[in-house]
Image: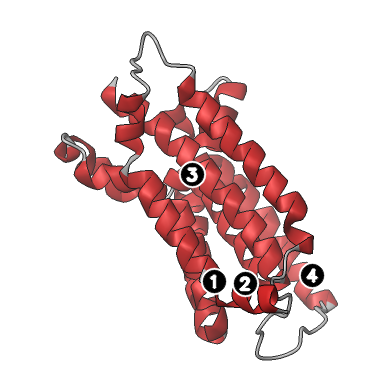
Amino acid sequence: MEISKLASRVPIFPLFSAVSLLVGWFLPGFYAWTDSDQSRPSPLLWKVPLWSAIASAVFCVALPWLPIGTKTPIDAPPKTMRFSVRSLLMITAGVAVAIPLFAKFPLVLSGIACVGAYAYLIWFCVRNPPHCMAASALIACLILPYAWVVGYDELDRLLPTLAVMIAGMPAFLPAAFLSQLFGQHFQESQWLAFLLTAVELLIGIWMIRLGPKRTIAYLLLVMLNSAVGSLGFYMMCIA
């Protein structure tokens, strides 16, 4: 019982925000500590993220048995989602129109989707104030691993594109991987980063609704993804 009370008092979500900020701020120092360069990356450069991922996986396996409350503070009980025939027809028509537009204007539509996901997150926080802390932790895990950009020596070189890139930075790693997989340059598939960021946000909101344990597991995944992506982006900047 005492352990359960102690666990309930631990500020888990602010802790995620603080760790994300520390990871992002000290990432250049970590890179320098590994004594890496572009021609000779240190083995530690990827061993530390690998062991962090393994430790996170072990923690997630043990998470169901940890004394963390599973009640979600949703104001109203969940309602069954129902669709009328008219709604289904409208959704089908919308998808049919969106597909050719997306094929022609992928960057614009993916940017709109990303902005819409951020707007939906804000709306979700307004409708469910008890979840604001978890939603803030989600944003922190997505963006704060890139905190080193603020103190970057050549920040003026990044400023022209930083405002646009920051929306897609959280998905830099999977977007770069998929770009290589499809044989495209990352600059040509920047829309993919926007789209994946929107997906990350929507999944995060869904996880927050499902409860704190799933939220914690997802935040670990998001923070690791952003941290490794931030490391790769830093290596590109200093190249």
Q: Identify the image quadrant of the N terminus.
A: bottom right
- Tell me the CA gap for discs 2 and 3: 26 Å
Q: Which residue is mark 2?
A: 7
Secondary-structure class at tag 1: loop
Could you tell whether 210 is left or right of 180 in the image?
Answer: right
- Placement of 130 over or under 55, stated as above or below: below
- Please say if the residues under marks 1 and 2 sit with CB atoms less than 8 Å apart: yes
Secondary-structure class at tag 3: helix
Q: Which residue is mark 3?
A: 226
Q: Position of residue 82 (x, y in %)?
A: 83, 79
Q: Which residue is mark 4?
A: 88
Amino acid type for the residue under numbered disc 1:
Val
- Tell me the CA gap for discs 3 and 1: 24 Å
Nearest-to-viewer mark from 4 and 2: 2
Could you tell whether 164 is left or right of 139 in the image?
Answer: left
Q: Is residue 132 visible?
A: yes
Q: Which mark is residue 10?
A: 1
- Please say if the residues under marks 2 and 3 sit with CB atoms less than 8 Å apart: no
